[in-house]
Image (cartoon, rainbow, N blue to C red):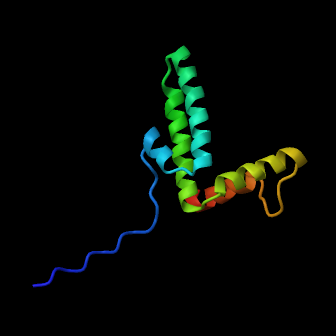
Amino acid sequence: MALPAAHPPDDKPVPPPADPHAIRASLSPNLAAEFDREWTLVLERVKQSMDLSAIHDLLNKWQHTAYMEMRDPGSYYRLLAKAEEILRTGKAPEGSISGEQMKALIRERLGK
């Protein structure tokens, strides 16, 4: 008797665990270097403060960044470029919406 065919693996990426090694392994070399710099700074800060929340915050940020990059490579640097343009010109890029418009969209999607 034949076994049923296994379902093909889902090609959608999944976020890496909130672990520094797993996050770093999922980053491009340039992003891994940025992660390393931030990791070193945060560890120094934690040594002084003895407050581990900075480590959790950093891992959360980079877990989301790694996942974003897995789904859309290059998106992190595009986001930085867009932020730089906004800071330099004082204007939102063409096609952007205001914070209030974004909140309204969120409320609409949540049915509120």
- Looking at the image, which is closer to me, 21 or 1? 21
The answer to which of 17 and 109 lies nearer the viewer is 17
Q: Position of residue 110 (x, y in %)?
A: 56, 58
Side (left or right) of 22 relative to 37: left
**Quarter of the image holding residue 48?**
top right
Q: Is residue 29 visible?
A: yes
Q: Residue furthest bottom?
A: 1
Which quadrant holds residue 7? bottom left
Count the marks: how many? 0
* Quarter the C terminus occupies: bottom right
- Point out the residue furthest to the front here: 29
Q: Is residue 77 left or right of residue 21?
A: right
Q: Residue furthest top?
A: 48
Tell me where residue 59 appears, x and y as whole percent: 51, 38
* Quadrant location of the N terminus in the rendered image: bottom left
**Which residue is pictured at 44% across the width and 57% down the height?**
14
Q: Residue furthest right?
A: 89
Residue 18: in sight, yes or no?
no
The spot of residue 31 in percent (x, y) is 60, 46
Residue 41 position, x and y percent, is 60, 27
Judging depth in this view, the residue of 91 and 84 nearest the camera is: 84
Is residue 46 left or right of 92 when viewed as pictured? left
Query: On screen, 63 above or below 44?
Result: below
- Residue drawn at x 60%, y 60% is 73
Residue at left offset 58%, top offset 48%: 29
Q: Nearer the viewer, residue 87 or 30?
A: 30
* Residue shown at 55% from the left, 35% from the top: 58
